[in-house]
Amino acid sequence: MKPNPMKIIKHTLSCCLLAPLIGILIGSMATAAPDDAKIARDVDSVQVAKAWFISLMQGDTAVTASLSEAPFNLDGKHEIATMGELKKIYDSVVEKKGKRNLKVGSAKVSLSTPEKVTVLITIEGDDETISVFVKPGDAFRVIGFRY
């Protein structure tokens, strides 16, 4: 039986055209999957953002400050330059508003880069959402929030 030249041509073309395309598709799927470092960064950022929010609502400004870092962006309008200034602001907030029984309804990452993770916190029983900005690193710290 003689080989069919058309079958050989079809097979050769399909291998030459499809193999690189399949390689590109498989490669892009591999890069689209989140890596372990990003997942860990996001999880740690959510935990720090929640702990920061809860400590502020409970009036524990020492813990709130320990989870923060200056410069600190306050509501997108003010940049607090030092930790001393930031601690005074936390104390003032607790003094004016008192301890509040607000609880985290949900917390999720809305934007994540190696430099900053934005965590959206919804308040239980409320339609309010705040954005908490976390700086990842050896010690994750809150560097701002927007209400």
Image: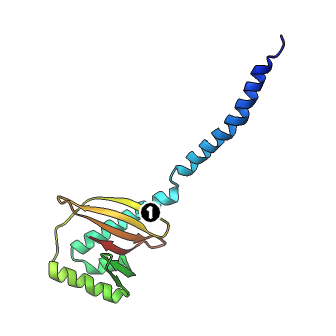
Secondary structure category for the residue under label 1: strand
At x 36%, y 77%, the residue is 68
Amino acid type indicated by mark 1 = Ser
Does residue 44 appear left or right of residue 86 in this picture? right
Counting the numbered discs, the total is: 1
- Viewer-closest of 30 and 57: 30
Does residue 133 appear left or right of residue 122 in this picture? right
Q: Is residue 73 above or below residue 130?
A: below
Place of residue 117 in the rendered image (x, y in percent of width and height, measured from the top left):
42, 66
At x 49%, y 59%, the residue is 38
Q: Is residue 6 above or below residue 51?
A: above
Q: Quadrant of residue 109?
A: bottom left
Which residue is farthest right? 2
Q: Quadrant of residue 81?
A: bottom left
Image quadrant where one finds the N terminus: top right
Q: Which residue is mark 1?
A: 112
Place of residue 42 in the rendered image (x, y in percent of width and height, measured from the top left):
43, 61
- Viewer-closest of 24 and 144: 24
At x 28%, y 70%, the residue is 53
- Viewer-closest of 104 and 16: 16
Coloring scheme used: rainbow
Image quadrant where one finds the C terminus: bottom left
Place of residue 100 in the rendered image (x, y in percent of width and height, measured from the top left):
16, 71
Please tell me how crowded label 1 is: few (under 14), some (14-19), or many (20+) other residues with Cα within 10 Å: some
